[in-house]
Image: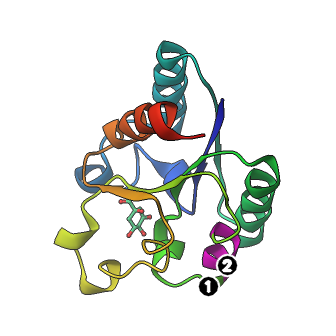
Amino acid sequence: MKVFVFNGPNLGRLGSREPGVYGSGSHADLVRLCETAAAELGIEVEVRQTDHEGELVGWLHEAADAGAPVVLNAAAWTHYSIAVRDAAAQLSAPFIELHISNVHRREEFRHHSVLSDLATGVIAGLGTDGYALALRWLEAHGS
Ligand code: DQA
């Protein structure tokens, strides 16, 4: 089984970006964490990050066409992008909405997600460990 992990805008800045909120690990560290977890689970993972909305939409189309499970941290787009929502709606395999921070303990505008009602499940507030947990769940349940 191959799982896609898609990370949205500003997540390439992990490590230097608001470390009190997002931790001190870099995006490269997050890629390593996912690859280590996937190897332990005996699955394949591909982790990508983009600051360009259209690129994420294209990646979601690719995952939809492949019937592949997705871990999606759409970052700020979570809160307002109908284009990302419409692309996520085309996924047929499970997808997990993920946030490193607990968005419900933060500003009001982060409390709403345009993705949550489409997602199979939502993980928020567990730091980057949430990615390993999401991969473990998908290995057990994801097609
Ligand atoms: C985030 C939370 C979003 O509100 C924010 O815009 C992000 C990251 C998280 O992982 O906690 O960029 O998705």
Give percent across and percent down for residue 55: 77, 63
Magenta span: 83-88
Residue 108: image location, x then y, percent = 25, 85
Q: Dot 2: what SS?
A: helix
The type of colouring in the image is rainbow
Residue 28 spot, x, y in % from top left: 54, 32
Which image quarter has ligand 1?
bottom left
**Residue type for callout 2:** Asp
Tell me, yes or no, if residue 18 can be seen here.
no
Q: Residue at x 57, y 63 (%)?
A: 9
Q: Quadrant for residue 31, please give it.
A: top right
The image's mark for residue 86 is: 2
Label 2 C-beta lies within 8 Å of the nearest ligand 1 atom = no
Find disc 1 in the rendering and name its residue: 82
Choose between 29 and 15: the one closer to the eye.
29
User: In this rendering, is residue 22 above or below 112?
Assistant: above
Which residue of the protein is positioned furthest toward the left in this rendering? Answer: 105
Kindly indicate the quadrant of the structure image that contains residue 134.
top left
Q: Is residue 46 above or below residue 76?
A: above
Is residue 72 a member of the stretch shown in magenta? Answer: no
Q: Quadrant of the C terminus?
A: top right
Q: Is 61 on the left-hand or right-hand side of 102?
A: right
